[in-house]
Image: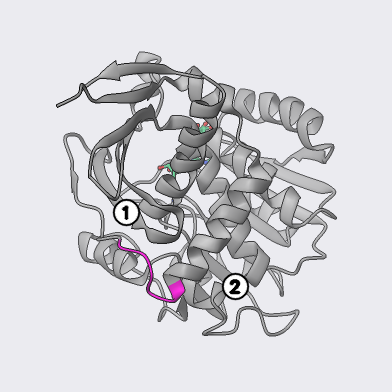
Amino acid sequence: MKTQKFLYLSKSDVEKVDLPMAEIIDTLDQAFIQKGHGEIEMPPKPGIHTAPDAFIHAMPAYIPSLGAAGIKWVSGYPENYKKSLPYINGLLILNDPATGMVLSVMDCVWITAMRTGAATAVAAKYLANLDSKTIGILGCGVQGRTNLKALKIIIPGLNNCIIYDIYEKAAIKYSEDMQEETGLQIKIAKSPKEVVENSEVIVTAGPILKEPNPVIEGNWLKPGVFASPVDFDSYFKKSSFLNCDKFVTDDTSQCLYYKSLGYFKHIPEIYADLGEIAAGIKPGRKSRDEKIMCANLGLAMDDVAVAIKIYKRAKAGNIGKWLEL
Ligand SMILES: NC(=O)c1ccc[n+]([C@@H]2O[C@H](COP(=O)([O-])OP(=O)(O)OC[C@H]3O[C@@H](n4cnc5c(N)ncnc54)[C@H](O)[C@@H]3O)[C@@H](O)[C@H]2O)c1
């Protein structure tokens, strides 16, 4: 038997491929349509939990239309910043669906950052008012950045961004970086309330906490708002969940699984899975004034769909290192 090799892509190799955000959004949109039609294999993610509010998750998925099969093994440790380590870390393995052989092992940090922003943008495509002008970002870290970048592609008329972070330094750095990257006017708010009351699109991206201390009241939400709680229910109070006309999630079974673990205690009845909306099985936004929240929990299919594209581009561009199994 011949020696089997796989392509190893480090964090900088993955970044070098530089898959454009617009392509990632389109790839995920197609994946959600297929999910809506039941064409994707993706069991709910199992995880282990070695420290309070920390997780290490296994996320497998098979997407037949892309010929993509793989698994992400990803950790999230909220206290890592105290050791100058990143919050999110991990690796993704891609397998050949025909033989099961390992095609590639790659760092998953860039993919996680980009695909989460892209998934918010897919939700916004169906659920936001696409002529929105003002966006609010709570939590000015990695997700605060990629979500803004992705939403500006789907809602190009966005021109004002109001931000909040408990660390002022983080907010200042964000405003400098993102103003340059997106061309948006960025204003640092004094409170989460100021952000929410003035935004048509809202992304919350602080740390996910099992016992959160949420602050966003239902009556702060503007008519017509679209909200993406990337940090689950850490920012939104029960009243804000209940004040939404539609509550959508990227995967109903996963959302209910998280609920069984103690997250999302106060969510209303789930209106739809994002895949059902993307596939046209259920309508998305029906009127200008609807308040809609879409909780994307992060799906293995998002990662695997992006990873296969990165693998193909890296292979064609001689990026990465071939290693023996
Ligand atoms: N749903 C998903 O698919 C998905 C995927 C990846 C990450 N996440 C979650 O997104 C969140 C952000 O991840 P990240 O990689 O951007 O982390 P990050 O550490 O880069 O950014 C978090 C930011 O939140 C700020 N912050 C901390 N507490 C805050 C508070 N109470 N109010 C406002 N800001 C606060 C920090 O100063 C930091 O700027 C995490 O909760 C992570 O678990 C979700």
Secondary structure at badge 2 equals strand
Q: Position of residue 41 (x, y in %)?
A: 30, 63
Please state which of residues 69 and 10 is positioned toward the viewer in this rendering: 69
- Mark 1, Cα crowd under 10 Å, few <14 / some 14-19 / many 20+, is many
Q: Which residue is mark 2?
A: 292
Q: From the Cβ of disc 2, is ligand 1 less than 8 Å away? A: no
Left or right of residue 315, residue 137 in this image = right
The N terminus sits in image quarter = top left
Residue 15: x %, y % from top left:
55, 24
| Other-residue count near label 2 (Cα within 10 Å), few / some / many at <14 / 14–19 / ≥20 | many
Q: Is residue 65 above or below residue 3?
A: below
Q: From the image, tell me which residue sits under label 1.
A: 61
Boundaries of the magenta span: 36-41
Image vertical order of residue 120 relative to residue 116, above or below:
below
**Disc number placed over residue 263 in the picture, else none:** none
| Image point (34%, 31%), residue name | 104
Residue 298 visible in image:
no
At numbered mark 1, what does the secondary structure look like: helix, strand or loop? strand
- Residue 259 found in image quarter: bottom left
From the viewer's perspective, tell me whether residue 207 is left or right of residue 41. Answer: right
Mark 2 and mark 1 in contact? Answer it, CB < 8 Å: no
Q: Is mark 1 within 8 Å of ligand 1?
A: no
Instruction: Residue at 62% x, 71% y: name it.
Output: 219
Res. 4 image quadrant: top left
Q: Amino acid at mark 2?
A: Ile
